[in-house]
Image (cartoon, grey):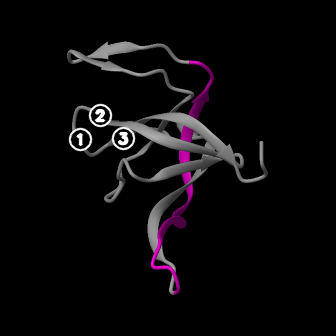
Amino acid sequence: MSGARYRHVIDIDRPVSVQDDVTGDITISWSRCYYSVPASVLTGPGREHVVSGAERPDVDARIATRWFDGLEPTMRIVFESVIYEIISIDTDATGRGEYRIGCKRGVSHDGR
């Protein structure tokens, strides 16, 4: 696959549990684990569709990127200051060429 296919850049965060020293309460914080990942990002409303008999919910972004070890559905993607929650991760036929990620829009870093 040509590098021109991936004309966008995304960052990927992983959740980190943080325990309050005084109260013992646990909160989730986010830590950047992948920076400037080349990707193809298509944003806009999606529709429910059926893949292999499983219904998929609406998506706000469809992201394709080269396969790499370690992507998990608990992570989130940041594209143009907007946070996207990962709702599905599919791979190409080889299972190690490309990720196809369905995302729901969350909140932006700048409050949008």
Relative depth, front residue between 73 and 2: 73
Q: Look at the image and tell me in which quarter the C terminus lies.
A: top right
Residue 94 rendering spot, x and y as whole percentages: 21, 38
Quick check: 53 above or below 3? above
Q: Is residue 43 magenta?
A: yes
**Which numbered dot is residue 92?**
2
Which SS does the magenta portion mostly show? strand
For disc 3, the marked residue is: 98
Q: Check contact, mark 3 vs mark 1: CB within 8 A.
A: no
At label 3, the amino acid type is: Glu
Q: Crowdedness of circle 2 by 10 Å Cα count: few (<14), some, many (20+)?
A: few
* Secondary element at tag 2: loop
Is residue 107 rendered to the left or right of residue 89?
Answer: right
Residue 55 rendering spot, x and y as whole percentages: 31, 17
For the residues marked 2 and 3, what is the alpha-carbon distance in whole angstroms?
A: 6 Å
- Name which residue lies at 44% across and 53% down: 75
**Which numbered dot is residue 66?**
none
Residue 43 rendering spot, x and y as whole percentages: 62, 28
Bounds of the magenta segment: 22-45
**Which numbered dot is residue 95?**
1
For the residues marked 2 and 1, what is the alpha-carbon distance in whole angstroms?
A: 5 Å
Q: Check contact, mark 2 vs mark 3: CB within 8 A.
A: yes
Relative depth, front residue between 27 and 37: 27
Relative depth, front residue between 26 and 61: 26
At label 1, the amino acid type is: Gly
Residue 31 rendering spot, x and y as whole percentages: 53, 68
Q: Crowdedness of circle 1 by 10 Å Cα count: few (<14), some, many (20+)?
A: few
Q: Look at the image and tell me in which quarter the N terminus lies.
A: top left
At label 2, the amino acid type is: Asp
- Name which residue lies at 37% across and 13% down: 49
Is residue 53 rendered to the left or right of residue 16?
Answer: left
Q: Check contact, mark 2 vs mark 1: CB within 8 A.
A: yes
